[in-house]
Amino acid sequence: MASEKRKKSLFTWMLILGCFAARNTQADYHIHDFHFTAIGTRSSLLSLIVISSVDNVQLCYYSKQNHQVVMKKPWMYQALGAKEIEQKQKKLISLEKSFIWAFKNLIKNETNIEKNHTLQVFVDCTMDQDIQVSNHFQFALDGEDFCQMDEQLGHWVAMKPEAQRFKPLWDNAFWNRLVKHYIQEDCVDSMKKILQYSSMRENVPPQVTVFRHDAPDGRVTLFCRATGFYPRSIVLHWERDGTLGVWGQESSSGTLPNADATFYLQVTLELPPGDPGTGYTCVVEHSELETPAMFPAPGKPSMDRPWATVLSIMAVTILVLSCAGAFITWKKRKTGMSSHLEGPLPSPPEIPLQ
């Protein structure tokens, strides 16, 4: 029994230390990713769409339909510059030939030459402060993993048997230099420029709302929502009576982008049965806050029966309307009688003379 308590206590402290570690490492961690989606046959490329995002915020895309790089955020033109954007556009136009070659060779045994296939390429690079920590390069054909670059081993891994015949190409020194050059120039270097420019933008502190939900069975769920903040890095955690700990089942929405290029995050705490939800505080840490901000969770709502209040309001409303109606009716009758009395006297009846 004592051993189980020690294990539980150790697990709790590991979670707490993990939370502090995340708070220290999250602030300067960024990811830049590209999604290439091509649709084609053995003889033609029908569609190619490329989407680029930084920290889950879509920044630009390219479409074969108009052969143009479109910036989703106007400030991206200043971040990269017209010359670099033009160079990227030329690269993507020439990349269409590579996808045509890929379809021709990947599905060379396809008997129906007009059948459509989908080829996807996923590329990303991650940075911690100014240090590149990882990158990924992966291919998928018709929704199934085809091959990927093993970053640790430094070579490509076939995910399907039919991908084995391409290993000589992937392990070629020229191909690997090309991949490394792409990751460094188009992924890492571009992300540095974007992050450097975004750091010049106006920073905004979070707007925080804390609320609760009391279920019919008595369970309490607390919600802490931060929105409208920039930059992206933020930490939200729960404390009870000023103490950090594991108080229930926690979940997070993840940091998501808003339409105005600010960010949103919600953390939820489901308390165990019997916990009334008192003494809890949502603590928010953001670069635009001088000190961690604390937002107490509201207490249990009043047990007054709302229908009694509603009925009282309805009764007063009906009484007022009834009085108003009676007054209007009385006024109309009075006005009608006054008009009749104040009108011209009727002419006397004519009496025939005898």
Image (cartoon, helix red, strand yellow):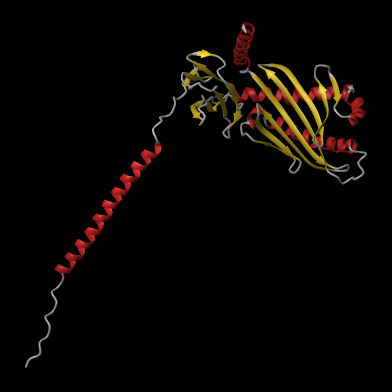
- The quadrant holding residue 123 is top right
112 in relation to 352, above or below: above
Position of the N terminus, as image quadrant, is: top right
Using residue 101 as the reference point, say whether residue 350 is left or right of it.
left
Residue closest to the eye, 331 or 213:
213
Using residue 231 as the reference point, say whether residue 51 is left or right of it.
right
Residue closest to the eye, 190 or 46:
46
Residue in the image at 63% along x and 15% along y: 25
Residue in the image at 87% along x and 46% along y: 114
Residue 94 appears in the picture as rendered: no
- Residue, far front: 1
- Residue, far left: 354
- Residue, far bottom: 354
Residue closest to the eye, 63 or 271:
271
- The quadrant holding residue 202 is top right
- The quadrant holding residue 348 is bottom left
From the top left corner, tell me how far across and down residue 70 is, in percent. 68, 37
49 in relation to 154, above or below: below
Using residue 25 as the reference point, say whether residue 145 is left or right of it.
right
Position of the C terminus, as image quadrant, is: bottom left
From the top left corner, tell me how far across and down residue 240 is, in percent. 50, 16
Residue 261 appears in the picture as rendered: yes
Please tell me how many numbered marks the rendered image carries.
0
From the top left corner, tell me how far across and down residue 349 is, in percent. 12, 83
Using residue 83 as the reference point, say whether residue 162 is left or right of it.
right
322 in relation to 46, above or below: below
Residue in the image at 25% along x and 59% along y: 329
134 in relation to 304, above or below: above
Residue closest to the eye, 188 or 116:
116
From the top left corner, tell me how far across and down residue 174 is, in percent. 88, 23
